[in-house]
């Protein structure tokens, strides 16, 4: 049944034009919306699921440029057996300990929990970078089904790496190949410092064979650059550029903090996308992002810290005032660049019929001329009231319509206890 949003104030996400109208939302992947001023032109209004949007703003739903759903059960977990003293030890004693303990059940529930959190924060599309070395095969299929059960579209990859041995690396390559035969997706790599030349070559071969891109962490910490220079006698972007990774418009390079001028020049002329993850960088104390000389192909992600893209945009803006001074307009452009990435590369699931209804009642007028100010200083996830994904209402009055959220959260809490107990044994 198509959705009818009545009495809406529709904000075009690109032009920021405001329309006081009714909106007919077609159901299906990459379908359309229709602005209808006179409801009498509709053949039978009873054929629609009607939602009254009087006093509400309606605009395109959001999308996450880089997520780690596998971290969903990390909140509140016990401290690691050793207090990390640097970035490498954060990975070793926290995240690589957690991902080794993930199995089918915890992967599935982590995906469900993440999808719910994304949906309730206004996002209907997730680009995710997954790792579960004890459950590699079918892990992406399990996640895809979980996201779709909640009602979200996705672009997934498995984090291929040599860090757990070459057998695990081969399993990651095989799982990726099997997944790409039947799903849209990317070829995932962890980072240069855990991917040797043979694995890198096989991954880029997969990328080319499936006309895909690479999704990889880049220069998040100087450890990545130092390792690359000492091992391969070159910097990370040069290594990836020589491998052909940066030539694909589908490639996603995550973080990109510690780059020199030449690396920035290469990326500026490359069609690939860069994803900024401000809060994760702060949490790991690895440095501050700068868009200097990188061009406009910068998107925003959450890096598994949370699922709130509005929060990520605000963090990028406020932290950037010292290290990467950007305007509210630039923050909004980075926030929305993920839609251009998906559309330009023909990925499905982020069509016009993905909408968010904001119950935003500001003390000052909001219009096309001052929208960016409201975006940074006003609108937040608490204003998300309804969410339409591929033409279906998946959130109504801030409650999920597709799944039993309370039941899933209860199951997740039980599974998290089991996960944490497994982590204590490593």
Image (cartoon, grey):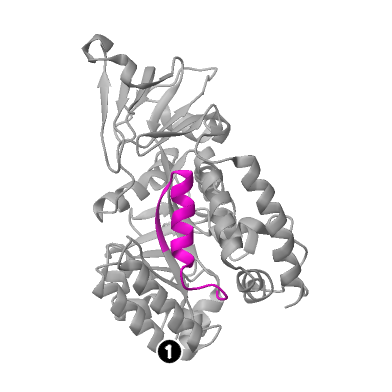
Q: Is residue 162 above or below residue 43?
A: below
Q: At which x and y percent is residue 11? A: 35, 27
Task: Say if residue 262 shows up in the picture.
Answer: no
Measured as percent of width and height from the top left, residue 245 is found at 32, 73
Q: Position of residue 71 (x, y in %)?
A: 60, 60
Tell me the residue that label 1 is attached to. 232
Instruction: Pick the residue in front: 195 or 117.
Output: 117
Q: Residue at x 64, y 71 (%)?
A: 101
Q: In the image, is residue 164 above or below residue 190?
A: below
The stretch drawn in magenta includes residue 200: no
Q: Quadrant of the C terminus?
A: bottom right
- To which quarter of the image does residue 406 belong? top right
**Where's residue 51, x and y in %?**
43, 20
**Residue closest to the eye, 139 or 259:** 139
Whether residue 109 is visible: yes
Instruction: Judge left or right: residue 140 versus residue 285.
Output: left
Residue 387 vs residue 1, the one in the foreground? 1
Total labels: the figure holds: 1
- Position of residue 159 relative to residue 271, above or below, is below
Relative placement, left or right, of 347 versus 331 is left
Q: Relative to residue 377, is residue 312 depicted above or below?
A: below
Considering the numbered disc 1 on the image, is that residue within a helix, a strand or a loop? helix
> 403 left or right of 148?
right
Question: In the rendered structure, does residue 148 fall within the stretch colored magenta?
Answer: yes
Tell me the residue at 22%/15% (across/down): 43
Residue in the image at 52% along x and 53% along y: 302
Neighbours of disc 1 within 10 Å: few (<14), some (14-19), many (20+): few
Where the N terminus falls, by quadrant? Answer: top left
- Examine the image and state in which quarter residue 186 appears: bottom left
Magenta region: which residues?
133-156
């Amino acid at each position: 049944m198509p959705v009818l949003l009545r009495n809406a104030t529709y904000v075009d996400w690109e032009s920021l034009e405001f329309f006081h109208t009714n909106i007919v939302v077609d159901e299906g992947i990459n379908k359309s919306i229709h602005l209808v001023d006179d409801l009498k032109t509709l053949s039978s209004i009873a054929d629609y699921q009607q939602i009254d949007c009087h006093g509400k703003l309606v605009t395109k739903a959001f999308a996450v440029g880089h997520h780690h759903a596998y971290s969903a059960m990390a909140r509140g977990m016990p401290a690691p057996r050793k207090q990390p003293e640097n970035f490498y030890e954060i990975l070793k004693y926290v995240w690589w300990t957690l991902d080794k303990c993930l199995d089918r059940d915890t992967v599935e529930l982590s995906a469900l929990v993440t999808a719910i959190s994304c949906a309730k924060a206004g996002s209907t599309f997730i680009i995710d970078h997954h790792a579960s070395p004890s459950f590699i095969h079918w892990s992406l299929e399990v996640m895809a089904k979980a996201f779709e059960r909640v009602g979200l579209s996705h672009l997934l990859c498995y984090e291929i790496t040599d860090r757990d041995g070459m057998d695990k690396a081969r399993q990651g390559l095989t799982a990726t190949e099997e997944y790409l035969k039947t799903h849209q997706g990317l070829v995932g790599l962890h980072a240069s410092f855990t991917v040797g030349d043979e694995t890198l070559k096989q991954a880029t071969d997969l990328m080319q064979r499936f006309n895909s891109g690479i999704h990889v962490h880049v220069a998040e910490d100087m450890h990545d650059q130092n390792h690359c220079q000492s091992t391969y006698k070159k910097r990370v972007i040069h290594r990836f550029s020589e491998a052909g990774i940066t030539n694909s418009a589908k490639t996603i390079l995550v973080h990109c903090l510690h780059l020199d001028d030449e690396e920035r020049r290469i990326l500026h002329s490359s069609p690939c996308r860069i994803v900024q993850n401000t809060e994760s960088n702060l949490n790991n104390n690895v440095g501050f992002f700068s868009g200097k000389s990188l061009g406009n192909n910068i998107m925003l992600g959450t890096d598994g810290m949370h699922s709130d893209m509005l929060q990520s945009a605000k963090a990028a803006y406020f932290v950037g005032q010292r290290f990467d001074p950007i305007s509210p307009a630039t923050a909004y452009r980075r926030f929305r660049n993920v839609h251009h990435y998906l559309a330009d590369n023909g990925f499905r699931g982020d069509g016009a019929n993905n909408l968010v209804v904001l119950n935003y009642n500001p003390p000052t007028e909001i219009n096309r001329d001052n929208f960016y100010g409201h975006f940074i200083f006003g609108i937040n996830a608490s204003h998300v009231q309804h969410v339409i994904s591929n033409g279906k209402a998946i959130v109504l009055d801030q409650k999920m319509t597709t799944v039993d959220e309370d039941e899933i959260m209860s199951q997740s809490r039980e599974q998290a206890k089991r996960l944490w107990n497994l982590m204590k044994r490593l």
